[in-house]
Image (spheres, grey):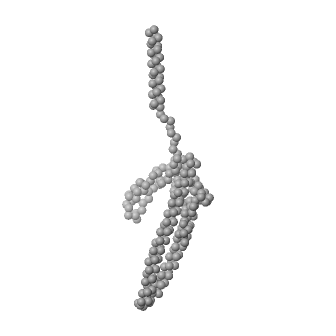
Amino acid sequence: MQHRTRAIVLTTAITTAFAVGTVALGVSRPAAPAVGTRTASVNLGRIFDKLQERQDFEVQVEAMRRQMQEEAQARKKRLESGLKEVEVMPDTPERQARVEPMILEQLQLEQWANMKGSELDYEKSLMWRSIYRNLRSEAAKLAEAEGYDYIMIDDGTDDLPTNRELKVSLEGQVLEQFQRRRMLYANPANDLTDKLIVRMNNARAAGTVPTTTNPNTAK
């Protein structure tokens, strides 16, 4: 009887120990490793250099700039011609009557030049806003197609250049660039710059990217 009791107690102890050990093992068992996040990078400088949208826009902006410059030179030439005629006139009421409109015309020319400069600046801002929107859109499509979770801008550089002509100290220039950097290293194998350029240029060629220049301001 005593042997049977001891056997039962021993069996119960072993069973309990095994159960406790199993529970403990289940609690302390590490979780399965999560699927790694995939990150790629792009180089903005290379994108801007080869982006068809930017090249097309710069042609349009340059045409606008030349048109504005030609008109400004024509108006300035007419004003200078009139001033030369007035300079040789005697100081009479007639001379005064011609000078006053020229002073007004000169002020109007300055205002016109400022207005056209603002229009050109506005057109350039439209270009960069359009490029930014298209860059985000095509980057999202590329990330989904390639299986990436993030596409980051590779702003790393091998050097931090300085300029002695600036009022900021050389140390300040270096520290400012240092603090602006967000990417210290990017694996070239995960560089999607060329693929993103192709996607953006193809979208441009297909007509899915709108023209950023406002035709009304080019007149």
Residue 204 place in picture, x, y as percent: 59, 59
How many numbered callouts? Answer: 0
Look at 47% across and 84% down and name the residue there.
Answer: 82
Look at 45% across and 83% down and name the residue there.
Answer: 101
The N terminus sits in image quarter: top left
- Residue 216 visible? The answer is yes
Look at 56% across and 48% down and name the residue there.
Answer: 144
Name the residue at the top extreme. Answer: 1
**Quadrant of res 208:** bottom right
Q: Is residue 143 left or right of residue 19?
A: right
Name the residue at the right extreme. Answer: 206
**Quadrant of res 6:** top left
Residue 162 place in picture, x, y as percent: 42, 60
95 is higher (above) or lower (below) than 112: below
- Residue 46 visible? The answer is no
| Nearer-the-camera pick, 42 or 186 | 42
Residue 184 place in picture, x, y as percent: 46, 50
Residue 70 place in picture, x, y as percent: 53, 75
Look at 54% across and 69% down and name the residue there.
Answer: 216
The C terminus sits in image quarter: bottom right
**Quadrant of res 209:** bottom right
| Nearer-the-camera pick, 152 or 16 | 16
